[in-house]
Amino acid sequence: MEFAPPQWIDSITSTNTVLIDRLTGGEPLPSGCVLATTDQTAGRGRGQHRWTSQPGRDLCASFVLRVPVEPAQLCSLSMAVALGVVACLDGLGVEAQTKWPNDVVVDGRKITGILPELA
């Protein structure tokens, strides 16, 4: 799978929310489409959890992945993506671990959470 160059937005409410809105609004976004920002004002995690970021310091991104997956498989998908992130970081010399069900941790601190959603 190839990813397109990210569409950068200076400031955005939530990269996930905006991509979901675009997809459910009928925009034909291809698999590999990436939306990124360094200022996410209303990020969210699993359930009702907020995901806060530090403007200008953190990278927030979401991407479209078109794969046949049942809703019950989303939890497994989030861990598979988290394992992929850990493998990439390890390849860069960064020691990272996963934390169930969807987090990536470096030096005991969460650096990202994987939030798969269906649209």
Image (cartoon, helix red, strand yellow):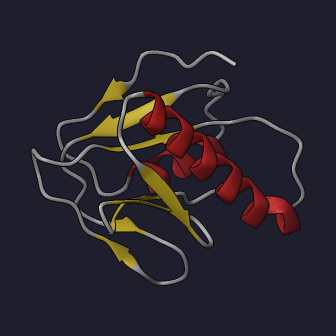
Q: Residue at x 61, y 72 (%)?
A: 100
x and y, in percent, of residue 53 in the image: 21, 60
Q: Residue at x 61, y 36 (%)?
A: 64
Q: Residue at x 41, y 35 (%)?
A: 35
Residue 98 against residue 6 in the figure, above or below: below
In the picture, measured across the screen, residue 62 lies left or right of residue 92, that is: right
In the picture, measured across the screen, residue 108 lies left or right of residue 79, that is: left
The answer to which quarter of the image holds residue 7 is: top left
In the picture, measured across the screen, residue 90 lies left or right of residue 58, that is: right
Which residue of the protein is positioned furthest toward the left in this rendering?
A: 56
Residue 65 against residue 119 in the figure, above or below: above
Which residue of the protein is positioned furthest toward the bottom in this rendering?
A: 48
Q: Residue at x 67, y 27 (%)?
A: 31
In the picture, measured across the screen, residue 59 lies left or right of residue 83, that is: left
x and y, in percent, of residue 33 in the image: 55, 26
x and y, in percent, of residue 113 in the image: 47, 61
Question: How many numbered discs, if any?
Answer: 0
